[in-house]
Image (tube, rainbow, N blue to C red):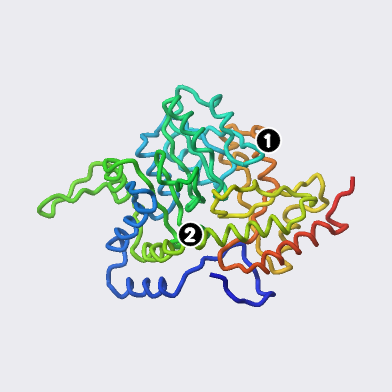
Amino acid sequence: MQQDKPVDEFLPFTRPTIDEDTIQGVVDVLRSGWITSGPQVRRFEAMLSDFCGGRPVRALSSGTGALELGLQILGVGPGDEVITTPLTWVATANVIVRAGAKPVFVDVDPATRLIDLDRVEAAITDRTRAVVPVDLAGCPVDRDRLYTLARRRGLRVLEDAAQSFGTTWDGRRIGSFGDLVCFSFHANKNVTTAEGGCLVLNDEDEARRCELWRLQGVERLPGGEQEVTVPGAKLNMTDIAARIGIGQLAHVDEFTQRRRALAARYFARLDPDLPLDLPPRDDGRTNWHMFQIVLDPDRMNISRGEFLEALNVRGIGAGVHYPALHLFRLYRDMGYREGDFPHAERVGRGIVTLPLFPGMRDEDVDRVCDAVHDILRSESALRHR
C-alpha cells in the first residue's frame, strides 16, 4: 500500500495508513447517532479475540489504560514491587507508581535492548508481585524463558506489548498465549484507532472485572437498577475509534510485510562502519514497529540533537524512543541514579528512530540512508582516532 509523493516532501518518522473504506466507516458511525462505546466496540473486540486465538479481549481508551487495569486485575498495590525495564516509554513505570507499588528496574541485554532475563532472578524479592516485560520496537522478549522463570518463582506477567501487535513467538502471535497482554493502538502504532488500546485476558472472570474497572465500576441490574462495587475508572473506547481499528485489522498482515521489507532495505543500505549500532536482526518474528539505530558518541563530534537537526534540514523526521527513564527526575527522587543500568543508559543516550511506515517507498529508505551517510561521514561529524 505504497503512496506516490514528491521526493522532496517532508518524510515523518511515522504516518498512519487509513483507507477510504475506513474513513467512510467512521462517517457512518458519526451519522448513526451512536458514537461512544457500542456495537463497533463489541465488533472490534470480537475481531481482536479472533486475532488472539479466541482469548477474551477488552478494548480501552489507551495502552496505558490497559497496563493500569492489568495491574488492578493482578491485585498490585502499596508495598508490592513490579520488575520492568528502564528502556521504555515512561508510561510502563508510571502505572506501577500510580498503583502504589515500586518499579524495580532491570538492565537490558545490550544485543537485544530488551530486559535481560538473566538479571531478573536477582531482582526478585518477597515483595515482587509481577514482571512487566516490554517488546521494544516490536522485538519480542523471549517468551519461553520469561514464562519458565515466572512459573518457577510464582509471578504473574503483564506483557507490555504496546509495540508488538502482529509480532510472533515461535509461530504464535503475541497475545494468543501467556498471561495478561497489553496492546496500544496509538496513532504511531502498526494498527491504530487514533488513541486506544486493549487488554487480553485469561478468562471471562478477568474480562468481567476489566469491564467493571474500565467504566466506573457500574453494574447494570434487572429493572434498570445499578450497583457500584469497585471504584472504577473511565477507560472505555468509543465506537469512532473502534471503527478505525476494524478497518486497520483488515490490513495488519499487509502492513507487517511491508514494514519487514522496508527494514530489510535499511539493513542492506546502511553502512555498518558508520558510528552507530543497527537494531538486532530479525528471524521473521518482529513486526518492525520502529527501526532504531544507536549513535556512538565516542566516534562522533556532533551530538544526537545536531544529528536530528541535520536530518530535519534534509526533510526527514526522526525520533528518540526512548531515554532511559530512571534518569527522569521522578525516578531519581526514588533513589535511582546514573550508572545504575549502564546498558539502558548507553542505548538511551544514542537511540534514534528512523522513518518506517507502510506508506513509505523504497526510495524513501534510500533517501534516509543517503542522508545518514552524508551526515555521519562528514569531517565535522566524524571523530578520528
Of the pair 38 and 339, the residue shown nearer to us: 38
Q: Is mark 1 on a helix, strand or loop?
A: helix
User: Residue 113: which quarter of the image?
Assistant: top right
Q: Residue at x 50, y 63 (%)?
A: 254
Q: Residue at x 66, y 77 (%)?
A: 6
Q: Name the residue under label 2.
A: 253
User: In this view of the protein, can residue 310 be seen by the observer?
Assistant: no
Mark on residue 342?
A: 1
Q: How far is disc 2 from disc 1 in space, using C-alphas?
A: 36 Å
Q: Badge 2 local density, few (<14 within 10 Å), some, or many (20+)?
A: few
Three-letter code for the amino acid on which mark 1 is drawn = Pro
Asked if residue 258 is positioned above or below residue 328 in the image, the reply reads: below
Q: Residue at x 36, y 72 (%)?
A: 25
Q: Badge 1 local density, few (<14 within 10 Å), some, or many (20+)?
A: some
Q: Whole-percent x and y of residue 238?
A: 34, 61
Of the pair 316 and 247, the residue shown nearer to us: 247
* Left or right of residue 15, residue 203 in this image: left
Q: Quadrant of the C terminus?
A: top right
Q: Is mark 2 on a helix, strand or loop?
A: helix
Asked if residue 161 is positioned above or below residue 268 in the image, the reply reads: above
Q: Whole-percent x and y of residue 149?
A: 48, 28
Q: Which residue is drawn at 51% across and 62% down?
A: 255
Q: Whole-percent x and y of residue 125?
A: 49, 23
